[in-house]
Every structure is written in structure tokens, then in C-alpha cells.
Image (tube, rainbow, N blue to C red):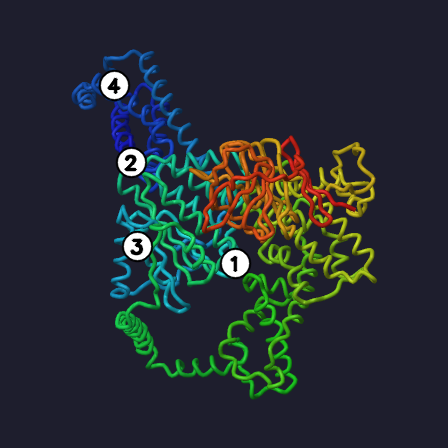
Amino acid sequence: MSGLEIVASVIAMINLSMKVTTLCFEYSQAEVDHIKDVFKDLQRLLQGPDGATLSVSQRISLSIKDCLSQLEKLEDQLKLGNTRKVMRRLRVRALKWPFTSKQIEKIISSLKRYEQTISLALQVDQTLKIDLARLPTAEGASFDSYIDEHDPRCLPNTRIELLQQITDWAEDTHGKSIYWLNGMAGTGKSTISRTVAQSFFAKGQLGASFFFKTGEGDRGNATRFFTTIATQLESSVSGLSQHIREVINTDSNISKKTLKDQFETLIFQPLLKTKIVSLQASRVVLVVDALDKCDREEDIKVILHLLSELKNISPVHLRIFLISRPELPIRLGFKKMSGGTYQDLVLHEIPKVIVEHDILVYFNHELKKIREELKMATPLFIFAATIYRFIGDTRGNPKRHQLIIDQTEEEIKILAEEFQELVGVIITLTSPLSTLSLANLLTIPKDEVACRLDPLHSILHIPASDTAPIDERKAHKLLSDKCLQLLLNSQHLKQDICNVQRPGTRQIEIDSKVIDSCLPPDIQYTCRYWVYHLEQSQSQLYDDDQVHIFLQKRVLYWLEALSLIGHLTESISMIDILQSLLEISVSTVLSQFIHDTKRFILSNRSIIEDAPLQIYSSALIFAPEKSIIRKIFKGHIPNWIAKLPKVKDDWSTLLQTLEGHTSSVSAVTFSPDGQVVASASGDRTVRLWDSKTGAGLSTLEGHTEWGHTGWVSAVTFSPDGQVVASASGDGTVRLWDSKTGAGRNVIRVDEDIHHLKFSSNGSYLDSDQGRICLDPVAGLFIQQHWLPLEFRATAVGFWDHLLVLGHWSGSITLLEIK
């Protein structure tokens, strides 16, 4: 039964129930009125925009049918002619009904059971929506976001042929799954993409949209790309909600997993399981704009590879409209796609006559607007005066009427210094801040920031001595100092920032609105980027300096804040940067503190990342006795912990434990540069890990023909680190792209290989069963002679001072060799 059919059935049921409740009024007014109210609420819900896509529609359809049937029978028995008129004419209050009082109570009881069934089903649907709300999304990424509300669309009578071509491509069930529109800067790509998104939205065919934008938080990277797409698809593709909800309930940390894992579990598999009820509903378009603005080239390649996999989705007729500049990573990504996956159009190669026509239409449109504004202003001389004041006002503040030529040399110098301070900070910000946040960060009045910002485009004069480029290092130093001052003085940075109280509360359970209210944008920015600005300033660190003071007073609050906003892993890289800035000869105390902080984070990253308050009720408690952090912050251990456990005296060689495999680990190895650890397991997967942070990078299992079907027994990196080779008991050796996780080749060996190693030039693999040639001319094959190679069957890997061990439990440990 479809959503619309349910709506029709419920409305019919409600109409009948109204008649019944009228006839039964004398018997049970209160009970029936309650049922009537519930049915009215249900009617409003089902007539609303979400009525046809309720995920529980199939579950409540049977209850609705049964209830409707009972009400129809009830009405037939109560057809007594013009009952009310007869009763009024005879002045009789009582009438012989076809039911006894007990029968009426039974009927009411039955109706209430239907009410409970429907209410429970709707509660399930509401729970589903709450589950989906647990997926973090990139604010402002959709085409219709408030942030970009005033961004232009294509004017009528422009881009006609192009827009029609895109429409035809989307409607063609046998066409290519991706349409890549690329062009140089200034060719109108985003205007076209918003127009296209708006058009498909109006037709009910837009599945999701994501508009990348540099410096706009999560829109500048791929962190929340697939979670945002999945959330939007859930609303636009009927029946998808249930499958996404199952994923979230199974793995509440899915939003923190690799892009490949997010795509596979939140999008690919749910779409495969979704049943499409009509051809129109099967036509879904995804719009991805400005992919070149994604800040990591590796992520761009991964996104392109994964999106190309959607061509295999059936019965959904899925199309991806992708817009970008023709940057190298994107061109390479498309080059690796299999034939027939995409079609492209180069925007700046459109015939000149078409472009000139569209530009002419645009000019006529804009000039018409100017003419209308001038007509309105013509009688008023103040219009001209306002323009003059706008150009002549040195600071853009209408309350100040001094022109720059009237100011003294000292005032001009102050103006230039103010300009350098504010603009120097703005141009070095990693992501933009509002006027209010800038004011808080720089500790200057909000009105003053506004005054300095408003007229920047029209400042007439800056002293010659101040026209040289702003000293970037000086600006970064200023900003890092301001960041640390803000963190040291802020009331927002404290123990239990969001007042959740319960130490077991998981980060994903805390409402994002609560986090944002407790950690305003300026605090969030400062927590993430103060070390970046310090690094860019090229400052040296010393004992008892501002960094040392901050760490001694607020390092745990800082880590709690990073955990709350989902960026705790970044703290490890930040600590590495601080270590690189140490002036060892005069900063021995700070050096020890920073080293201790790193060990503290590495040992407890996973638990703090999952539940922020565990930093006080677990990590701090189990830190070694000699830990500097334990000594300084011992007073932050909760009072309800009466007896502290016995702990080690000092940090051991164990750096961190990597959890993820569900079966024993059979092989581990480092990449040539030591940045990545690869592990092979009996769970039929290969996993890649960041050796510095312990974060999972990718799970090499794929789907369809690419996944191993047996125990993975060996794994190795190519000399350049670009390829991972794995061997399995399924009789295959598989080659993977180490950056994207994409499968490259499958080599059938029909032998149990337990050890692999690339040759120095990467042209072949040596195994305990022979040499595997990778010559692109000769093809992929097992060379028919065996090598007298000796291998040790142990899951051990070395790199520099690090040792990695795989265990039968499925865990992996990283140790420091002292």
C-alpha cells in the first residue's frame, strides 16, 4: 500500500468515525472525542509533505484497513434514518439502539487499540527521524541554504541548450551515470549548478546537493560529504530511512569512519535494499558543485571513485551532476573511471555566439535594475551626496564625517595600523568568522570591527609607508596570541563544558545545538587553529611562556572541547607541531609536558573521542603516577570515585591500540614512509591506519568482485607506497590503491600465500609460493618457477623507532622502541 493510498484510507476512516462518534455521542463522548483528536492529528500528518513517505506506512496499513472495515459495519448498523430529527420531534431523549452499553464499550475499546497501534507506528517514525538527526551534516551545503540564498541563478532565456542537454541526460535511462561540467574560473559554473538543482527539485527528482566552498567550515572538506548526502537522500527517496537507521543503530560512529565506509554503509547498500514504487520515484539526481574546492586531493579522488560505483545501483535511476574546474586531481580521477561512466562538457569551449548572447541578456537585466533605482533617486539631491560620502568616508561609519584629508599624520598612522591588524587577521584566518566572533577574538568592540570592515572596498588613501604587503608571520603571531588569551580567559572552556554530568554520555548523543551554544564559533575556531597560527608565525617555545601556561591550566578542557566538536584526532598533529617549535636548550620543562600530553592523548584517544567526560573519570585515573598531567589535574577526578586503582609508575612502550578487526590479525606492515600501517585479518579485510593518530584510513574489502572471500594472510606496500597488495586463502592476490581504497587488479594464484614483498622497482611480488610478475606488457601471472625465499610467519612490522604487532584478538598495538 503506497503512502498516498494510506492517506486516502485514513481520510475515509476519519470521515466514517465522525459519523459514528456523532451517533454514539450520548454513550461515550469523552472516549470518542479522544480517538477523534488522534485521527485528526494523523490526518494532518498524512496530508502534509511527509505523509507519502512515512517509513512505517506498510506497517500501519493493515491496522487502517481493519479499522476502516469495522467502522463501515458500525455505520451500517447505526443507519436509523433521520435519527436526530425524530428524537427532537417526539421530544424523546432515549432511543432503542442496536447495541447495549457493554457493546458500545467494546467498540470504543477496539477503536482505542487501533489508535495505540497507529500512534506507536508514528512514534517509530519519529524515532527514525531522531536517529537520522544523529548524522552530522555540513551546514549550508545544500543548494537552497539560507547562507547562499542570494547567489544568482541563470536568467530566463540563457543557457537554454545546455540546460536542456542536462535534462535529457538525466531522463535517459541508458545514459551515463555522471555528467561532468567543467570550466575555468568565472565561467558561471555555480550559477548553472544552482539552476540545475532548483530545476530538478521542482520536478521532485533532486536526491541531494552538496556545494563545496573554501573556508566555509565543513563545506571546505569531505568530512561530512557523504553524511550530508545520505541525510538528504533519506528525505527524497521513499523507503531509504529504515535502511539508514539500521546502519546508525549498528554503528553509531559511522560518521567518523573513512569516506569509503560511510559511502558503502550509508548510501550504496541502503540504495540497493530500497524498493522503488514507480518509474518517476526511481529518477534521482545528485548535484555536487565545486569539487575542486575540497581541500584534500586524496579525498577528491576517493569521492570520484565512489560516486562512479553508483552506476551499479538498480532499480534506482541515479544520476550525478558534477561541476568543477578542470584541476589535475579531478582529471586523473575521471581518467581512472571505466568506460561509459561519464560524459563531460567544457564550459569555456561553448561557441562564442552563445556566450555573447547570454552575456548580453545579463547586461540588459542588470542595467534595467540600475535604471529603475536611478529613477527612484533622481528627485533627491541627497542621493548624490550619499554617494560622495560613501566614497569619501575613510572608515565607513556614518557617525564619522571626517575625510582623510582632514586628519593629522598621527591619525592616519593609527588608521593604517588598525587596517593592518584587522585585515592581516582576516586574510590569515583558516575559515571565516562573523563580526561578533572577530570582535571576541580580537577583544575590540563589535561596532569598531563593523566600522573597519564596511568601507574596505572604497578606502581612498593609505600612507605610502604602509602599502607594503602585510607581514604574514606577524599577523599569525598576533592571531595565535589572541587565540591563547581567549582560551585562557573564556568561561566556555571548563570541565564538563556542556553540563552533561554523566561521564558515560557519548559525544554523538549530545545535541549539536547544545554544543554550539556552549562552544561559540570563535571558541571552536580557536581550539582547532591556534597551533596552526603559532606554526605559521615560526615562533619558538620556551618554559613558562604563554603556551606553557595554557597547557598547565586548560589542556584537559581543550581536549574535551575538541572531542565535543569531533576533532580530537587533530590534537595529535598539533602536539607534534608544538614539539617541532621547542627550543630544547631553554624549554626542558615544557618539552616534558608536551611529551607527556602526547602519550596521554595516544593512550586514551578512542575513549575520549567517544565519550568526552571519560577524560576525567577514566583517562586521568589510569594515567601513570609520574604523568605530569595526572599530577597537575588530579583534583579533576570526580569525587564519587572513592578509591583510585593501582597504576603503572611511568608510560610503557605501548603507544596506542588500534581497534577495528573482528578476527585475528595475520599480518601487519608499515608504508615506506612510516605514515600508514596496513593490517590483514581473518575477517577477510585489509585495514589502513594513520600511524601517528591511530585513526582508521580505509577498509579494503570493497563489494561485488573486489572483496576477499577468505582469510587475508599477507599484506605489503609497493616501494612508492601507492599500492597495497594482499593475499588470501581464497586463492587470489589483490592490488589496491592505498589512497582511495579502490581495487586495481585481481591475480588468480590458486595457492595459499602467507607472505608477500614487492621488488625494489615494484615490477613483481615475491611470495612464499613463487614470483608474481606485474609487467603491464606480459600481463599479470604467476611465473612458473619457485624462489628459495625464507619468510617468518609472524604479524610484526618495523619502521624507525616504531614496532607494530598484530594479535589473535583482532587488535593491533603500536609500540615505541626505546
Q: Residues within 10 Å of mark 3 (few under 14, many from 20)?
A: some
Which sits in the foreground, 90 or 114? 114
Give how far apart the Cα atoms at labels 2 and 1 are.
Answer: 39 Å
Q: CA distance from mark 3 to mark 4?
A: 49 Å
- Report how far apart the C-alphas of labels 2 and 4 lie in the structure: 34 Å
Say which of 171 and 55 sits in front.
171
Q: Residue at x 51, y 72 (%)?
A: 454
Disc marking residue 295:
1
Q: In front of the other: label 3 or label 4? A: 3
Name the residue type under label 4. Leu
3D distance between C-alphas at marks 3 and 2: 23 Å
Asked whether disc 2 touches disc 1, contact meaning CB atoms under 8 Å apart, the reply is no
Q: Residue at x 33, y 59 (%)?
A: 195
Q: Amino acid at mark 2?
A: Val
Callout 3: SS: helix
Position of 81 relative to 615 (above/below): above
Residue 375, quarter of picture = bottom left
- Spatial CA distance of label 4 from label 1 is 66 Å
Residue 715 can be seen in this image: no
Q: Tag on residue 277?
A: 2
Label 3 with label 2: CB-CB less than 8 Å: no
Label 4 belongs to which residue?
74
| Mark 2 vs 4, N-terminal side | 4
Q: Is residue 143 left or right of residue 783?
A: left
Q: What residue did someone put label 3 on?
A: 199
Q: Residue 243: percent from the left, percent from the top?
A: 42, 35
